[in-house]
Amino acid sequence: MRPARLEPGWSAHAQLSYAQSPGEVASWFYDLEDCTTACSRAILAEDATVAWARVPGGGVPFALGVGINGLFPFAEGYAQVGRGRVPWGIGGRLGLPTGGWYQHQLFARADVPLGSERRLLWNPGVFLQTGHSPNRASTGHFFGVVQAVGVELPLRGFVLLPSGALAWGRAERRSYGERIGPESAVFGTVGVAITFR
């Protein structure tokens, strides 16, 4: 969860989220104990990003960053396309290789004013986790569509962002030649993020 409107310079963003189980097949991707059965469980995850933003007078504001989501590093780019009363923009994350698994995202952001300082944030997106295990015995993918909303609460020196999301996901994998899935699920998440500028 992030605001659409960019502020120039460096920022650090951290988020902690809790998701209901996305299903037996999808949960396998996030199990640190390499479960083979009974993988379905809720997921606690962290996300941390460091980014640099440029806000030119006449051009399109943009930000570039790097970060990690759980155990998965990424590079990120975002462009703030709309600069009016309801700023909005589009961006993406490109997963960097870690043991053969990647996470990629395409997302949009929009801010709706709720008074002089607070804003309602809308962050829809699509998500793909794909790749293979280090020994290449397991392959798979998890595709998700997410609708996330949050509230931006400016405080002294930082911004607090509580949020909630509803997601639909579809997962499938192969392990040692055995096909597991596909399986679809609808699940919710809640999170809280903090941004330092």
Image: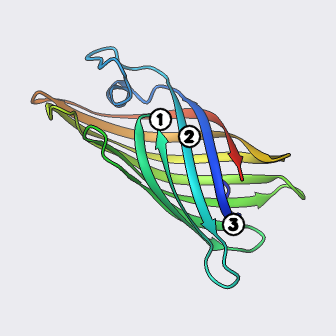
Note whether residue 4 is visible: no
Q: CB under 8 Å between callouts 1 and 3?
A: no
Q: Is residue 159 left or right of residue 14?
A: right
Q: Which residue matches tag 2?
A: 166
Closer-to-camera residue (29/20): 29
Q: CB under 8 Å between callouts 3 and 2?
A: no
Q: Which residue matches tag 3?
A: 8
> Which kind of residue does numbered mark 1 sit on?
Val
Relative image position of residue 173 (x, y in whole percent): 23, 34
> Which kind of residue does numbered mark 3 sit on?
Pro
Sequence-wise, which precedes: disc 1 or disc 3? 3
Residue 133 image label: none
Helix, strand or loop under label 2: strand
Q: CA distance from mark 1 to mark 2?
A: 7 Å
Helix, strand or loop under label 3: loop
Q: Is residue 98 left or right of residue 193?
A: left
Q: Is residue 85 left or right of residue 183?
A: right
Name the residue at 32% across, 28% down: 25
Sequence-wise, which precedes: disc 1 or disc 2? 2
